[in-house]
Image: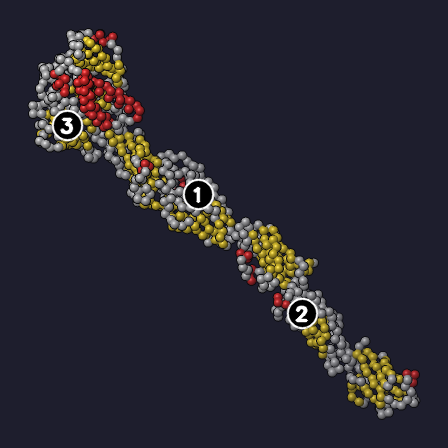
Amino acid sequence: MNLLHRLRRDGDKGVSLVTLLVGMGLIALIMGAALTFYVTQSKSAATGTAHQKAQSSLVTLSNRVVRDVQVAAPLVYASPTEIIVETDSASGAVTLTRYAIDVAGHVATQQVMPNASKSFDPVANASAWDAISKTTVASNLNTATNATTGLPASQFSYYQSNGGAVTVGAGTADTSAITRVGISLASTVEKTATGAVQVSTFAALRNKTPNGDIATAVAPACPPFSISTPAAGSSPVLTWGGIAGVTEYHVFRDGVDVKTIAANGGQASYSYTDTVTGSTGNAITYRVLAASADGTMSTACQSVVWSPPAATPVVTANVFPDTSTTPAEWDASGATQPYMTLSWGKVDGASGYTVERREVDTTNYQPLTTAAGSWVEATKITDITKPTYTFSTPGYGRAYEFYVEATSRTGNSLASNHVKLLSAPAAPTTDTPTPTDYNVNAVNWTASPTATGYAVYRYPDGATPTKAVASRTLNGPRVNLAAASTSLPQGATLLATVGAAARTYSDTTPELGTKYAYFVAAINSGPRDQTGVNKTRYSATPTSAATAAPRTDSALQFPPDPPTASASGSEANALGTNKVTWASSKSATSYQVRKFWPDATTRLLDKNVGNTLSFSDTGNARGTQNDYYVLALNATGVSPNAVGVTVAQRVTATQLPDAPTSTITAAPSLSSNAYKVAWNDTGDAGNPSSYAFCNTSSCKYQVYKYNGSRYVASGSASYALSYSSSVAAYGSQDDVYVVACNAGGCSDNGSVAEPRSYPGPFSTGGQDTVRSAWRTNSSNDNNHSDEVGATLMLKWGDSAGAAAYTLSGPGAIYTSGNNGYTVSPALGLSTTTPCRQLRTTAFPGP
């Protein structure tokens, strides 16, 4: 038996408390389902604390009214804003419960008058209510139809058993025709285009006939139904489950029966597509009632409010940085990190937009398995004139999926196209660049997540990269920032782009002595807009405002070898000193001079001379020759000469030779005036023999001979170590000396050699002219001598160049400074002395 019927049937004899409570619980459960369903439909418009409180208030009021109407026996008074119900009590007295909507105060109150007599007229005795306290059940009620939002006034409505409306006017106590009460409540909380809170339900009195008698007919159960909209702009589709024992179903739209559908036995489900499409924001109320064969319809069935969903937004997207050629855009924008921007066209009728977001993996762009991969509400946009959203903190090298729904007062649009986006990578961490060789700098870095490659950049020599722009606060989409640029600031140039596995790069183009700063940009590839096409993006530059800007470190290359200007020996007034001079070397802070024997590897000197451009090496012997080269030093190391020196890189200093010592090795003879002078080799005498350096081109000797007034060069200088010539006249001499010359210069004059010739021939009477000793016998040499007494007279001719004559004979040698000499007895020669052989010899020169 129908519970309501049972309650009505047992009303005259009293209803047990248990029965009443069970009945009320079941009814509340049934009605609660209806209320819950409708409230669920309204949640898109009723969020936040204020909405929740308003919703709770309206549900409380409707539940109380439903509870009391369901057990009413009978309904005592009915008006659009007031309802009084009577419930039996065991003592025969009645309990009157009054619900009133205060239009001016926007509240609903409840009053309870217990133990009233059955003859009490609550209308005629209205003042009796003044003494009974009021309990506010609901507040912030919308009590007048709102033309802006379309919200109805909160009120009660009444219906007959055939579903027709009962007119109660301003209020009536004649409630006999009323079998069902409609309860429509709306809150003033956020009763704007952004949404509102509504509750709409029905409560059926104990089933009655039009005369108020107990009816035997049982109303069919309410078909549970739902409404869907396949696409924006389409008509609503109502779907419900079949009810056993009914003959037809009636579809009500805004209280009007618009469609009757015959029941088909055990058919499990039914559907109906209405012909209306409506416009976004316009709410339409639907009910589906089942009818039995006797025409009795379901009562207290749920209403479902449908509003055409807003059009589905079409989302376009972009990711900053939004160029793919260089990382320069970071500097141009002033952005501190990557960000993602969504935009879509304005949706007519929408009251706002909801953006949903979830993180996805960066390989297949599928949801993460962790909670981080769940959908979260990124933002709710209430200003429908700004259909954009910027996700300003996606992080580096992370991927996200987005979609947008347009919200209206009664529901959301279908989800927009889903957009998956990958943010730019973080800049890799670089180590300090290292000069690994001459003209080679190594740049090393760590991996950057999602990087598919790396770009290595270098700043000009000596440049110190500094922040070129100040950071800017992100405000809206990309267009609010500076235009993109492909030109890197401060002259940075791309050296190379390498693969994802690379962690080092060798720059083989730096000049010696240069100081270069480097940075490495990570490159990744992924979807950057709504098309889903993969595009490359770069990490930030060191001069940008990015939070993950890379570090810039400099590498100073080894210094170049200094350009050597000259090396000379025998400086003026500083014999024995070799001076090496050179030009400055780029970036050098000091220099080192090294000294060797010619073409040798034996180092004789290794001296750091500081930051000077010359060095004087003292104490070198004459006739020495040494090679020198100069190294430049800076904080990195030594110039290339430290590795291997070529002949072209060496400079040579030669000390001038000692003066040669000349020796007559072949003197003139009686038969020839020719002679030969030789001298010692002093050109490279200072070097060990294994490092001798003189040859026909590097060392020369010049012979000088006195010509009677001065010394003049005799012939050309050569590498000969001897000189041959002849004394020009009999009985004369040559004065000869030699000067030695090498690369360092010429020596002092050497020692003088004086080769002398013999006197010329002289006559001896009628005999031949001779240059040797003349021998004669006084007894047979009358043609050449006269004997006068004891005196022997010898005569001979002049000898050219003779300075004296020596007359020798037995026992005596006579000399005279004249061409003739008279030998007297006093000299030991007498006329009585037997004739003896005499010899005359001519001597040259003084």
Instruction: Give the amino acid at mark 2.
Output: Asp
Label 2 Cα crowd, 10 Å radius (few <14 / some 14-19 / many 20+): many
Q: Pick out the residue farthest to the left.
A: 294
Residue 503, x across and y down, in percent: 42, 49
Determine whether 770 is above or below 503 in the image: below
- The image quadrant that residue 399 belongs to is top left
Q: Quarter holding the C terminus?
A: bottom right
Q: Which residue position holds label 2?
A: 681
Q: Residues within 10 Å of mark 3 (few under 14, many from 20)?
A: many
Residue 111: tell me if it is visible: yes
Which amino acid does the dot numbered 1 rest on? Pro
Q: Which disc number belongs to residue 223?
A: 3
Q: Which residue is mark 1?
A: 550
**Mark 1 in CB contact with mark 3 (< 8 angstroms):** no
User: Reading the chain from its start, which is encountered first: label 1 or label 3?
Assistant: 3
Disc number lying in front (1 or 3)? 3
Give the CA separation, mark 1 to mark 3: 67 Å
- Residue 12 falls in image quadrant: top left
The secondary element bearing badge 3 is classed as loop
Position of residue 602 relative to residue 203, above or below, is below
